[in-house]
Image (cartoon, helix red, strand yellow):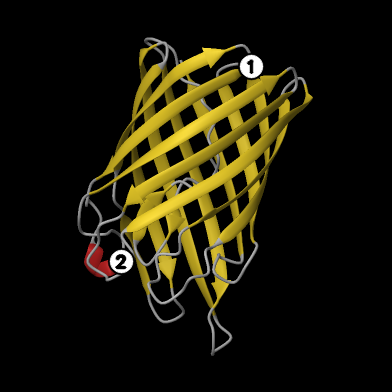
Amino acid sequence: MLFPAVCFGAYSHINDDTEDTDTQGRGNMQFEINTDYSYSRIDGDGGRSRENQVNATLSYGLMDRLDIATTIPYQRSNDGASTQYGIGDMSMEMKWRFYESGPVSLALKPQIMLPTGDDKKGLGNGRNGYSMDAMASYEIRYLTISGNLGYAYADNKFGTRKNIWNASVAAEVDVASRIKLSLDVGSYRNDDPHSNTNPAFAILGLTYSPTKSLDLDIGLKKGLNKAEVDHSWGAGLAVSW
């Protein structure tokens, strides 16, 4: 939840945090709002580029194992010379948990991206895109291990790679009755056609749930190579009813 979008040349809405297979359940809804702030060093001049994104997501359980959701992002970026801000490309998705047996569950998440952001300002791709993620979770008592493998067709007007894969794995531990600690590592295809170094990252997150219907999250993301942003931090909340 903390870092829902990877920022390429434009924002292509490729998930980089590992998602578990949980769904809302029939008739249930969830509203999430989260923000992340990242910065990277700019080669050559010693400056820094900064990115900030706020996402609002509304999910609804059509069936016990099938959700629909939509996300609207607001973005602000500074490359050291200019600042751009505004609504980015919104996304619509489904999540289907098609298999469940004991501690093991599997899910699929198809997603479409709509060009609602201003591509002239770098706030969107200017074209429709789509993605598909496969998810697996293994849950035993206080530990949940999840893995994701995905593909996205990130059509755009900027000459960056359009076929992008992503892979990640995460472990989440209940450290107290209302507190969970997670570690997430992953990588995704670099959209720069002149680079074969794929960004890699690690995310350390903490979730506090004061009630069953409210989650509060904070997290820190660290780039594991030069292709990834140097650092990101995020915070968010999710309300269910």
Task: Identify the element where label 1 is drawn.
Answer: loop
- Rounded to the nearest angstrom, the CA distance separating label 2 from label 1 is 43 Å
Within 10 Å of disc 2 (Cα), the crowding (few <14, some 14-19, many 20+) is many
What residue appears at the point 25 percent right and 62 percent down from the top-left corner? 156
Q: Is residue 61 above or below residue 232?
A: above
Residue 92 vs residue 95, the one in the foreground: 95
What is the three-letter code of the residue carrying label 1? Pro
Task: Find the residue positioned furthest to the right.
Answer: 175
Q: Nearer the viewer, mark 2 or mark 1?
A: 1
Name the residue located 40 percent from the left edge and 61 percent from the top edge. 76
Determine the secondary structure under disc 2: loop
Q: Is residue 133 above or below residue 104?
A: below
For label 2, the residue is 122
Relative to 157, is 221 above or below? above
Mark found first going from the N terminus, 2 or 1: 1
**Type of amino acid at the residue the image marks with label 2:** Gly
Name the residue located 44 percent from the left edge and 23 percent from the top edge. Answer: 30
Mark 1, Cα crowd under 10 Å, few <14 / some 14-19 / many 20+, is few
Q: Is residue 48 left or right of residue 58?
A: right
Q: Which residue is mark 1?
A: 103
* Image-based side of 75 in relation to 105, left or right: left
Q: Quadrant of residue 154?
A: bottom left
Marks 1 and 2: in contact by CB < 8 Å? no
Specify whether 41 is left or right of 93: right
Of 103 and 53, nearer the camera is: 103
Percent coordinates x, y for residue 197 in the rendering: 53, 69
